[in-house]
Image (cartoon, rainbow, N blue to C red):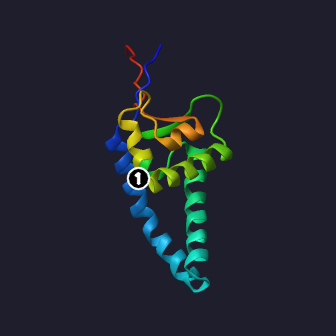
Amino acid sequence: MSITKYAFYWQRLLGWLIDIVLLYPISWVIQEQTINLGIIPSNIIFFISLGFYYVIFWVRWGATPGMLLMKIKIVPINGVMTVGRGISRYIGGIISSLCFTLGHLWMLWDKKSQTWQDKMAKTIVIRVEPEEKEKTDV
């Protein structure tokens, strides 16, 4: 029986920061191209665009590029990672941020290191261990 190795807070934070750096140029272009629609419509388009990024990466690869670099990934507690779970997780992340990041910090005292968005989507974030090479006698 293998022991689940939950991602550390610093791994998740650095993964998120890497994603922010990667997304900044794209975000800037989106904001520049939509600002003439007004602040509220521009921000709605911005957050929907970010949602596509996160949900596509989470569903397809179980991680964003930043998470992959930090060797962590999202795993559903039961079932598979669906678009619905991805959307739920994204919305949960927004709620966590709006509550003074309390939802993100929640993992520091949670038994499974889950944030609010993990709880909403029924996911955990684990460390990806490199596969051990098979020992062969030659």
Give coordinates of residue 82: x percent, y percent.
66, 42
Residue 42 as seen in the image, left or right of residue 99: right
In the foreground, 101 or 63: 101
Give the amino acid at mark 1.
Answer: Trp
Residue 138 as seen in the image, left or right of residue 119: left
| Residue at 45%, 17% in the rendered image | 2
Look at the picture and state if 98 lies above or below 77: below
Look at the picture and state if 137 lies above or below 32: above
Quarter of image, res 25: bottom left
Give coordinates of residue 100: x percent, y percent.
40, 54
Give coordinates of residue 123: x percent, y percent.
55, 36
Q: Which residue is mark 1?
A: 16
Q: Residues within 10 Å of mark 1 (few under 14, many from 20)?
A: some
Residue 79 as seen in the image, left or right of residue 27: right
Look at the picture and state if 67 lies above or below 37: above
Q: Quadrant of the C terminus?
A: top left
| Residue at 56%, 69% in the rendered image | 46
Q: Find the residue positioned furthest to the left.
A: 10
